[in-house]
Image (spheres, rainbow, N blue to C red):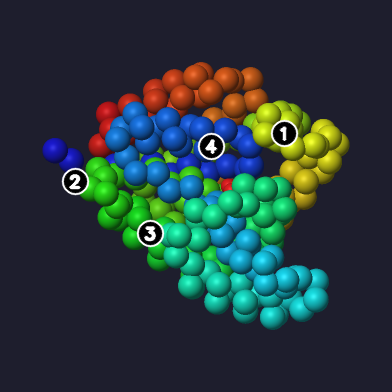
Amino acid sequence: MSNTPKLIAIDGPAAAGKGTLAKRLAAHFDLQLLDTGLLYRGVARKVLDAGVEVADNPEAYAKIAGETARGLVAADLEVDGLRTDETAQAASRVSAVPEVRAALLAFQRDFADTPPYDGKGAVLDGRDIGTVVCPDAPVKLFITASTEVRAKRRLKELQDRGVEAIYAGVLEDMQQRDARDQGRDASPLVPAEDSFLLDTSDLDADQAFTSALEFIASREPFG
Ligand code: DC
């Protein structure tokens, strides 16, 4: 049997279909799943609750965000309110702070090296998993879709949850978040060179899953 860890790194922008695919792959291969966006959302929630505004004082903000990230524990990720758009926007801001990224790196690498609950391996999804967190992962997927398709998906998701939203507002939020996630200096969102690019603009969840499985079947130790 191969000693290569069963590790799947999934990156891509918001609402491209990463989360759904990550869940399905983790269940299919019996791997532990870490949605790393929740870590950044957890830090963001605490910073928001503390009433700190980045515009007030960027340095104080970075310091508090970095300290919060160091103190983050798993229980912080179970609180309500991490899935809101307010938290998403704030997460996109705190995640540009290098101290925050550094503070969360060890937690993510530990999870990948020794997944909890006797896992056989792990699936991590985020923005910099294939490039920074797990650069040696045997499988790297970069999931994307056009901004318009992603905004429509997000709008439907919000409406299904009973949240009032309009397309133009969702699209603008998405564009702002993309620009910040891709344009920051610290671990910007870019595909790893050796990643499999999957554009889900014209695919449903089943087709995306099938396509990812075909690629994974070509990689050790999965093939
Ligand atoms: O995946 P998500 O929408 O929950 O992520 C929220 C924000 O967190 C995202 O806009 C950027 C940041 N993030 C990051 O910088 N690196 C990651 N690995 C995961 C998320």
Secondary structure of residue under mark 3: helix
Q: Which residue is mark 2?
A: 3
Query: Which of label 2 and label 1 is nearer to you?
Result: 1
How many neighbours does mark 4 have within 10 angstroms: few (below 14), some (14-19), or many (20 or more)? many
Which label number is shown at residue 109?
3
**Type of amino acid under label 2:** Asn
Distance in Å between CA atoms under marks 3 and 2: 18 Å
Q: Is residue 209 above or below residue 164?
A: above
- From the viewer's side, name the closer residue of 194 and 213: 213
Residue located 34% across and 60% down the image: 110
Comes first in the chain, label 3 or label 4: 4
Q: Which residue is mark 1?
A: 162
**Type of amino acid under label 4:** Lys
Comes first in the chain, label 2 or label 4: 2
Comes first in the chain, label 2 or label 1: 2
Secondary structure of residue under mark 4: helix
Tell me: is circle 4 under 8 Å from ligand 1. Answer: yes
